[in-house]
Structure formats: C-alpha cells, structure tokens
Image (cartoon, rainbow, N blue to C red):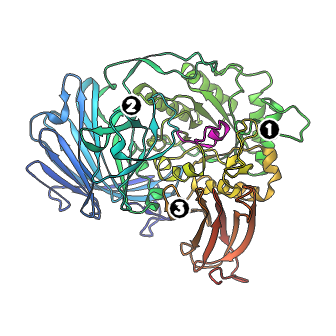
Amino acid sequence: MTSRLPANAFADGSPRWNSRVFILIAWLSAWPSACWANHVWTLKSPTSRLAVKVEYDDGIRYTVSIHGQEVIAPSAMDLKVAGKGWLARQSGDPTATERSQSERIDFVVPRKYRQLKTKYNELELRLANGATLVFRAYDEGVAYRWKTTFSGEIKIEDELAQFVFPGQPSAWFPEEESIFSHQERVYKYVPLAEVGPERFCSTGVLVDLKDGRKIYISESDLLSYPGMFLRGAGEGKIGFAGKFAPYPLETQPLNDNQNGRNAPVTKAANYLAKTTGRRTFPWRVMLVTEKDTELLQSEIIFNLAAPNVLKDTSWIKPGKAAWDWWNDINVTGVDFRAGVNTATYKYYIDFAADHGVEYLLIDEGWNADPADILSERSDVNIQELVDYGKKKNVRILLWVLWNGLNEKLNAAMTKFEKLGVAGIKVDFMQRDDQWMVDFYGRVAREAAKHHLLVDFHGAYKPTGLRRQYPNVMTSEGVTGMEQYKWGDEKANPEQELVLPFVRMVAGPMDFTPGAMTNANKASWRWNVGLPMSEGTRCHQLAMYVVYESPLQMLCDSPTRYRQETQCMKFLSAVPSVWDDTIALDAKVGDYVVVARRSGDQWYIGAMTDWTPRELKLDFSFLPNGGYKLESWSDGVNADRNGQDFRYRAQQVSSTDKLPIKLAPGGGWAGRIKSASAAGKVSLSAP
C-alpha cells in the first residue's frame, strides 16, 4: 500500500533526507506473515490484505487472494533456458528466504506524487539448479520475477507466465492483430471465456471479477528482454498466458513511401533473448483493487523498476509544449506563408512565451530527409529557432525517426546538444522484441549524457524506464488525439474513460490533448487539416488534470488558442507534474474525478463518457480555510455544441460539496487557490 507524503516532510513529520531513496531491510529467520511446509509457502502483504500462496511440485504455481478470497487461481510460471530446460520442473528442494522492506521515494519527475512511502514483503525461492524466483507482496498488488546466476551467456527459449482467474470474469482487452504494433488498440470489454489461445493483446490489461474487484496485469523493469503480450490461457482455463516476440535476426523496411520507418521482423531466432546468465528478469505485476479509484493512485510499476542511475538531474525540466503536427500548422492572420519554415515556428514560440508554455515540439518535416537525422531543410533554421526561443524562455524539442537515430545515435545526440535542443521525440519503433527494448535503453542513456529529454512515440507501454532514466518523460502507446485525424473511430469519449484505469496505470501517456474545435456524435467530422475532437471543450480541459504526462502537449493551433482567452487562463496555469493526487470518484469506462496538488494550489478534473452525469465534488481534502475556485464547466447547450462552456469564480472551503453537471462526452475543470475568508459563499446550500 502506498501513502502520500507532503512535499517537505515524511509521513511522521520528519524532514526529507538528502538522499532520494531511503531503504530499510529486515532479514527474518522466522516471520509470522510467511510459512512453509511440504513445499508450500504463503507470503502476505504488510497489512495482510493480500496473500500469495506458492506451491512447488513438478513445477511452481502461485495463487493470489485478497482478504482470504481467491482472485488469481493456481497459475504456473517457468523459464526455459537453452541447454538447461524448464527451470521450475527440475528436481531438488528449494530454499526460502524472506525479507521486509520500506522505501521512501523522492520522485525526480513527480507524475502523481512528490514523494511516496512504500512497504512490501518478499519471498525468495532458490532452486537447486541455481535459479531464483522472487515474489513481492505490497498491499496494493503482487509481483514475481526470475533471477539467474549462470555463468557466461544464455539463451531464453521460452517463458510460461499464467494468470488464471476464478468465476466468469471479463476484461478490457486491447486486442492485437500482430506483435508488430504501435500498441494503440481499442479496449474491448470481452468475457475472458471467449478469449482462446489464438487471440492476444498488448499489456496492460484490466480484468473485471464482477464484484467490484479488478486485477491489472502488466510488467515492470523490462530491460534487455522482450515485452509481454497476453493470449488466452487455453487448456480449459479462463485467463491469460504470456506471449513474447522472438529475437529478431532480419528486418525488412516496407516500401511505403515513408522513409522505411515501418520495419517489421522478417526472420526471427528460435529463442526470445540472448543475454548474460547472471541477471534479473522483468517483474510480472498484478495490481489488485477493490475500488476503481485505486487504479488511479498506484505507482506500482515505478516502484518495481530499477532505481535512478543519473547523478545530476537538475537539468530535467517537465512542462507543456506547443505542437505543430496535430493542427496541421494552420495559423491565420499572419504576414508569412504558414508551413514548415522558420517564420512559422517563431510564431509558435511567441505564442508559447506569451502563455508560459515551456517548450515547442517541432514534429516531422524539419529534416531534409527524415531517414537522415543530421539533414536540415534550408527553410528551417534550427539554430536560429533555438536561439530565438532561448531569449523567450521557450526550448525546442525535435521529432526524429527511430531508425535514422539508430544509425547515427552518437552524432545526432552530440549535434542536438551543441545546438541547444532540449529533447527528442522518437517515433515508429512498433516493436518490443529484445533488440528494440535494448534500443530504448540506449536512447535513454545517450540522451541523458547529452542532457536531452525523451518522448517515445510509436512505442510500447511504459515499464519503469523513466525511474532508471528520469529524462524519459512520456510515451505514446495509446489511442490518443491523433486518431481523430484518421476518422477510424478509435478515439471517442468512451475510450477516453478507459485510458486512465488501464494504459495510464503503466506510466505517463502522451495523449496530446487540447482540441479547441469540439463536437458531439452528430456534428463531428473527419478533417485531417482542421481536426476536431468528440466531446466537449471542458472534456478536453479536464484531460490536463486527469491525464498524466510530465511533457504535456497543446495540440491545437496557436491561432485557435489566442481566440480562446478564457480557456487559456486554465491551460497557461495548469502544471504537468504533481505533488499529490487524490482520486475523488471513478468508475472504469464511465466517469472520473481527480484532484491534484501543485505547491499550495489544487486542480480538479472530471470527465464522462457519452452519458451525461451529475456528480458532487467533496472538498474535504482541502485544509481548513477559505479558497477561491475558478471553474470551467459544460455550458447549457454543450450537448448540441461541444464548444459551449461556462467560466465561474467563487469561494469554497473544506466543508463544501459542489454539484456539477457534465454533458454527454463532457467535463469539468477547476483551479483552487487560497483566498480571504471574507465574502465566503457556501456551496452546500440549496
């Protein structure tokens, strides 16, 4: 279980230590929360909320329960190593060791919290063949991983990772057609009994046990190993089994007139990974919830990841970014020809500077040849733009094609640092085999050496790399705003109310919100050059509180934003990182209400699907005192015209409860800051 801490103190009121992470470990010879006999062990979480039962008998199986009720039925795990076979099926008695650990984390880039205090219990089973299975139990979830101590290099031929469930559960299932994927799939709510071994999805996945309890499945600390997909378990079992991409031997760029950016694997090895024999493997993670709000508050993927390796992180600055691609560089009322050119990008910089936006992301087009990462167009002077932005406190981010970056990684990083570029957006990887996972690590490491931020697009879901390399700010792997440009119905308010509970649990998601042209189902039109969103204006504003991305985009045109001065009051002020997060109310796929603190100010975001809703905001999370609330709410006619909204300023206190109305596909956004108690208006009165 995680608990929030104030920005300047730990839970007991003691001041923050200078170190970023403090760890207390107790090794125990006899521990009341774990017991073993006849090759059966039980590991309990710190408060005994969760328990993991591990059985060893011609293989290893685990079972997970909450408050004594089974939520994961007996499920097998194993690892097959070339020349050694399946590790869990070999003879010999395992030895067991347990430990308890407390960890205080000071986030370099605080997605949800400035600090967290975590506790967990851990069981290590050392097998006779030299392999070890590590089980970890937090109050919020459980995880396990393999650890080997073999000499030299080994090949992993296969992995068995089962997640079997009792009863007749359903799941929000992001079904894939190929493992060559952007992992931007629609979450289909399907009965798991209908998912056979031939069907598979990317992770994470959210399983609904139908009694309020849910299980989120993903992975953490994915390093030099293929990512995990999930297929139907088969064998008459209801659940999942891991599916992994084999090691790539050959790729073939597609002749798609897109600079060979799409490069699927055409020849693969008969193994998953070629790696050192002495290492740990990725965590298989199960977050267990009883309330949907718990999904919004977890940092379990981050907690399980490798710790920060960067000594100096002072240069890592989160923020918002003006962005040219989604709005198709549609600016008006200017005396230059708008397009991919220096004059246009100066206009974007001017807008960013006028509204406190820290970055400009220059997307595809600035290269003379996208496949040649060092090339530049004659009409786009990057150095001039960097220098111009520096005078106005706006820094430049550059889009790059992954294979071009791979070919000239060191030269490109050196050039970008010399130019004064702040970071890169790396695009179109579309794979998570071992080679590509290694590529992510190399990019993060080399970018950090040159003080560059990283945004991964065309990417697999986050697996904790941002903890090891805090310069990794955000990732795509989401059905984001760009889908509105294609007209393929992947993006809509129904999907947008699933994302916070599934994709966002893994880590920051570069959804790229901020559309200023908003429409209902009947009036929405597909228009690549002048795109619009489904849902209301306030649905979009609320995303800046609900959706987490330390590098948050403003997707629409500066011209449109300048016309929307009232909305820019909110978009200029809203942060992209948070000191504290409280999920006030939520139901997966239906609605969400989140409060977040930055310094002494609070922001609230509420969103609904196509169903209009009346909700009540309970301000009891506020300290005593008077506050000024500025709110942006759906207008009376927002169901007809999504751009209709109402701005209001009023007084609130911790004792107030404010009713709010959300139109179909609607939203509500609020900013709360201290105010004089004089003239206070009670909001709980009729």
Disc ID at residue 330: 1
Q: Amino acid at mark 3?
A: Asp
Q: Amino acid at mark 1?
A: Asn
Cα distance between the residues tagged 2 and 3: 33 Å
**Residue 254 visible, this orientation:** yes
The residue pinned by badge 3 equals 580
Q: Hey, which quadrant is residue 394 in on the image?
A: top right
Cα distance between the residues tagged 2 and 1: 40 Å
Where are the magenta residues, as a range? 477-490
Q: Element type at marker 1?
A: loop
Q: How many marks?
A: 3
Label 3, residues with CA under 10 Å away: few <14, some 14-19, many ≥20: many
Label 1, residues with CA under 10 Å away: few <14, some 14-19, many ≥20: some
The quarter of the picture where the C terminus appears is bottom right
Q: In the image shown, does 499 or 382 lie closer to the viewer? A: 499
Q: Earlier in the sequence, mark 2 or mark 1?
A: 2
